[in-house]
Image (tube, grey):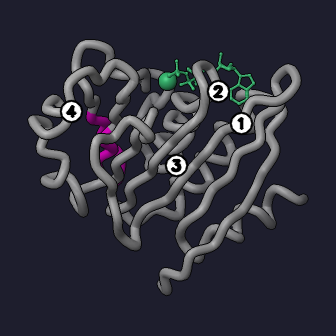
Amino acid sequence: MKQDLIELTAKTYSEEDTLELAQKLGQLFVGDEVVLITGELGAGKTVFVKGLAAGLGVPDEGTVCSPSFTLMNVYQGRVPLYHIDLYRLEDPEEITDLGLEDYFGAGVIAIEWAERLPFEIKGTRIIRVSIQVGDGDNRTIKISGLESLPEIAENKKG
Ligand SMILES: Nc1ncnc2c1ncn2[C@@H]1O[C@H](COP(=O)(O)OP(=O)(O)OP(=O)(O)O)[C@@H](O)[C@H]1O
Ligand SMILES: [Mg+2]
């Protein structure tokens, strides 16, 4: 797979829509992707991770929830899913202690509140997801990253 950067914008109108979109994305993953998710409180970042989990074959993806006492939850699908939420990150050392670099390439890493990362992550396997809240249940979701993404956009049109 080539790794040109592409960008797509999708609109979702319900939690189920967002789950479905993220599930399609998760299905394309090979297991070394880093997903940086941004969006205000209640935008749907955790919903998006649930969808990714479904796409990765995590059984009972409904149990996916933001890690509250630790920074990271791990779910086992066809590849591991490392779910990190930086909302409560107070000290940058907490993320250093996590040893994030050990997880690169070892599974899919999904990070909520990615803008709070105290350092920049670079690489070709990075996918940025920004969720913007619109009226009611409307969300505008921008996904940028791997070349295979347009498949999702085409599916969304149907
Ligand atoms: N189109 C939509 N996509 C996703 N969630 C939606 C949508 N419409 C409504 N919702 C609702 O918005 C809420 C999103 O909650 P979620 O926990 O995923 O947000 P979050 O961005 O993870 O918040 P936090 O910053 O607290 O972690 C859920 O209650 C969900 O049902
Ligand atoms: Mg969340």
User: Does residue 37 lie above or below 107 as drawn?
Assistant: above
Q: Which residue is mark 1?
A: 132
Asked whether mark 4 and ligand 1 are closer than 8 Å, the reply comes as no
Q: Which of disc 3 and disc 1 is earlier in sequence?
A: 3
Whole-angstrom CA distance, mark 4 to mark 3, is 31 Å
Residue type of the residue flagged with mark 1: Gln
Could you say where residue 19 lies in the image, as x and y percent from the top left? 64, 37
Between disc 4 and disc 3, the foreground one is 4
How many discs mark residues in the rendered view? 4
- Verify CB contact (< 8 Å) between mark 2 and mark 4: no
Whole-angstrom CA distance, mark 1 to mark 2, is 7 Å
Q: Which mark is residue 43?
A: 2
Q: Which of disc 3 and disc 4 is earlier in sequence?
A: 3
Report crowding for label 1: few under 14, some 14 to 19, many 20 or more residues within 10 A (C-alpha).
some
Left or right relative to 128: residue 132: right
Q: Which of disc 4 and disc 2 is earlier in sequence?
A: 2
Where disc 2 sits, the SS reads loop
